[in-house]
Amino acid sequence: MAEIVEKPKKVKIPRHAMPCQDPKVRAHNFEEVATGYTQETAIEEAKRCLQCKKPKCITGCPVEVLIPDFIAKIAEGDFEEAARVLKIKNSLPAVCGRVCPQESQCEAKCILGIKGESVAVGRLERFAADCGMKAGEVEFEKVAPTGKRVAIIGGGPSGLACAGDLAKAGHAVTIFEALHVAGGVLMYGIPQFRLPKEIVQTEITNLKKMGVEILTNQVVGKITSVDELMDNGYDAVFIGTGAGLPYFMEIPGENLNGVYSANEFLTRTNLMKGYKFPDYCTPVKVGKNVAVLGAGNVAMDSARTALRLGAENVYIIYRRSRNEMPARNEELEHAEEEGIQFRLLTNPVSIQGDERGWVKSLTCLRYELGEPDASGRRSPIAIPGSEFDIPMDTVVVAIGQGPNPLVTTSTPGLVLNKRGNIVADEETLMTSKPGVFAGGDIVTGAATVILAMGAGKKAASGIDQYLKAK
């Protein structure tokens, strides 16, 4: 009788964790939390990819990165080529590899994730992009100039993505940025420990080398207008001004000293180099006790920044439970590891001040969860008589933001929705004004960096078609 030889079972390679700084160490510095894959780890993780014939991961990416292709190059050890493949679709891969919520997009579509863990697409994207940066910028084949000029209002994710694709198409592109440095939320919003400023500026420098002109300190709506840009020789305009108008809770005490919107708190820290604390002093007073109102990614960024600026106790105040917190799981885990204290099923009702007009304490109510609301989340219900005070020095309000009306109110004929967002065609992103396009948070409301970039790329396609038809 012939001997039966069993086929060796294929060993499943587990998903490789991202190396990080020790929480006790990183809670007191602004250096990047995640330290990145080594070459060996990146190759091993890349080999987990099944190289599907019909890759669903690409359909989950707002900018349609050629995911299996760049991962295959990493598996081969050709890191520079992996970076080049990334850049075909994504103008800012080193940024996206750090802040994009891949777990709910490309990785959520990965076949491996059905019965196990998906390929770590975001971590591999970061690795390949960083390798490309070390090797020098990716060169793209120059195309003949079209003679068409496009003005882009806003140098954030949507504007930068739009500019990159238009430059590749041969159009002359000028970005008008209101602040003294381009990058938008990438520079003033996301903290240094999640997205180093040097990374952002390197990506922007690469866009300049592609021919994109960037003008800073250009507040469109004050020094010029959309109509004036069109009258002064621009063939099309893209509005990508984001959502920079902070919302407040409208409770007593929000006008006290020591109360910040998350937008102001993070902008001061980022653009005044507070991330170099204590060597670089910036006018952001935190004190010993800090409360952050909200539980999204911006709230986590604010809380973790306050901790690094010297606060002893930092609280996340949120009226629902952990299950309803909108922040990425990774950000929640990092915040908890660093010592951020979650005060859940709690909501502030007023802020108390001292005789000098500074924050002294936060008055809150305890809550319980009732039936789901329209969004599917269980509605919070206040518990009568549960009022209590927490000693506090600083309060940061991080409950969202809306469109800044500066550009929209200075542009006659621009149709807006009831929230003040610009209404744009779903396919081309052209607005009610011919030749004027819009995308990102100014259209959708506050969303993610990668969704804003996807909108910028879609607008670039719409603008290109429009210019070719002129």
Image (cartoon, rainbow, N blue to C red):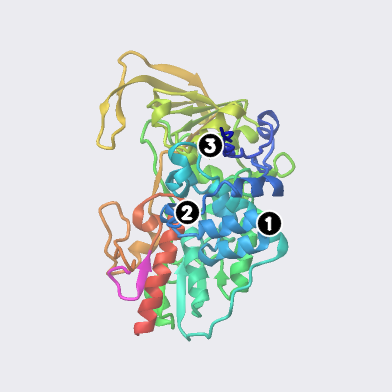
Q: Main secondary structure of the magenta part?
A: loop
Task: Work out which residue is located at the far top of the displayed protein and give it.
Answer: 385
Q: Position of residue 36 (x, y in %)?
A: 66, 45
Task: Work out which residue is located at the far right of the displayed protein and give it.
Answer: 279
**SS at mark 1 in the image:** loop
Q: Which residues are magenta?
A: 430-438
Say if residue 65 shows up in the picture.
Answer: yes
Residue 189 falls left or right of residue 231: right
Q: Is 432 a magenta residue?
A: yes
Which is nearer the eye, 97 or 463? 97
Determine whether 333 is above or below 195 in the image: above
**SS at mark 3 in the image:** helix
**SS at mark 2 in the image:** loop
Count the marks.
Answer: 3
The residue singled out by tag 3 in the image is: 331
Say if residue 261 shows up in the picture.
Answer: no
Residue 241's mark?
A: none
Q: Nearer the viewer, mark 2 or mark 3?
A: 2
- Residue neighbourhood size for the residue with mark 2, other residues' Cα within 10 Å, grouped as few (<14), some (14–19), many (≥20): few
- Residue neighbourhood size for the residue with mark 1, other residues' Cα within 10 Å, grouped as few (<14), some (14–19), many (≥20): some
Q: Amino acid at mark 2?
A: Cys
First-in-chain label (3 vs 1): 1
Q: Quadrant of the C terminus?
A: bottom left
Determine whether 255 is above or below 76 in the image: above
Q: Amino acid at mark 1?
A: Gly
Determine whether 73 is above or below 167 in the image: above
Residue 52's mark?
A: 2
Q: Position of residue 6 (x, y in %)?
A: 57, 35
Residue at point 72% right, 59% down?
134
